[in-house]
Amino acid sequence: MIRPLRTVIVNGSLHRPSRTQVLLDALRDSLNDHLALHVHHIELVNLLPELGAALSTDALPTDAQHAIKAIENADLLIVGTPIFRAGIPGLLKHLFDLIDMNALNGTPVLLAATGGSQRHALVIEHQLRPLFSFFQSLTLPIGVYATPEDIHDGVITSDALQQHIQRTINLAVPVLQGVQARLLQDTAVTQEQAA
């Protein structure tokens, strides 16, 4: 029996509500149409102000330490962030500075971002993808980017964005099915060894 993927959704927004959360929810729902997911949400805004002052995980409160462990133990990460002045929030980068550098090796990561205009769309390729390449993660083929014209009052109103989300999910699903199959195989091997 295939177990649900332990999916951790990281919202790098410092605001609530946020367009980034709307985009992340849409990605989660679209993926859930194809795969069984066990979802854990991490919102950066909930980790303030202690996160910014911490230089190690030992200095974090319990909730933030649990967030770090959830990220490190995920089968799948979905990471979304707003873009400010052509960059990701410093606190989101700091969160990943506290992640063990070997914990995300081979972990699939779906990247998403929101920004004020299309001028920021390449931040996914130039900042997020290199960050997860450092961790030797498997960044999924297409990132998803949205502007204020795509999301109104907490709802995706752009057909183009909806189509892009579906195209992204269609490319991600075969990879994630392979991850599920590998996890099933690893579980079977572990059970055989224990018997």
Image (cartoon, rainbow, N blue to C red):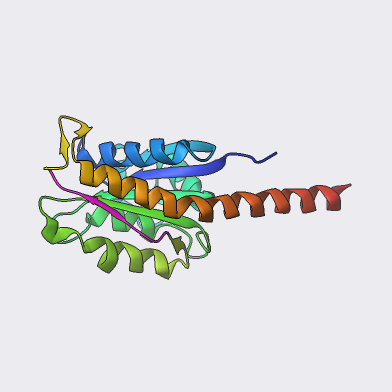
Above/below status of 77 relative to 66: below
* Snapshot quadrant of residue 63: top left
Q: Position of residue 32 (x, y in %)?
A: 46, 37
Q: Residue at x 63, y 39 (%)?
A: 3
Front residue of this view, candidates 43 and 38? 38
For the stretch drawn in magenta, what is the main secondary structure?
A: loop
Residue drawn at x 11%, y 43% as measured from the top left: 149
Q: Is residue 193 left or right of residue 164?
A: right
Q: Is residue 164 magenta?
A: no
Residue 52 relative to residue 87: left or right: right
Visible residue check, residue 7: yes
Q: Is residue 79 above or below residue 17?
A: below
- As rendered, which of 6 and 35 lies closer to the eye? 35
Most distant residue in the top direction: 153
Q: Nearer the viewer, residue 172 or 114?
A: 172
Residue at the spot 53% in from the left edge and 62% down from the top edge: 106
In terms of depth relative to the viewer, which is nearer, 92 or 21? 21
The quadrant the N terminus occupies is top right
Q: Is residue 118 above or below residue 27?
A: below
In this rendering, would 51 be left or right of 62? left
Q: Which residues are magenta?
A: 140-148
**Residue 182 sits in which quadrant?**
bottom right
Q: Does any portion of residue 57 appear in the rendered image?
A: no
Q: Position of residue 20 (x, y in %)?
A: 24, 42
Residue at the (15%, 47%) spot, across then down: 147
- Horizontal and vertical percent position of residue 163: 29, 46
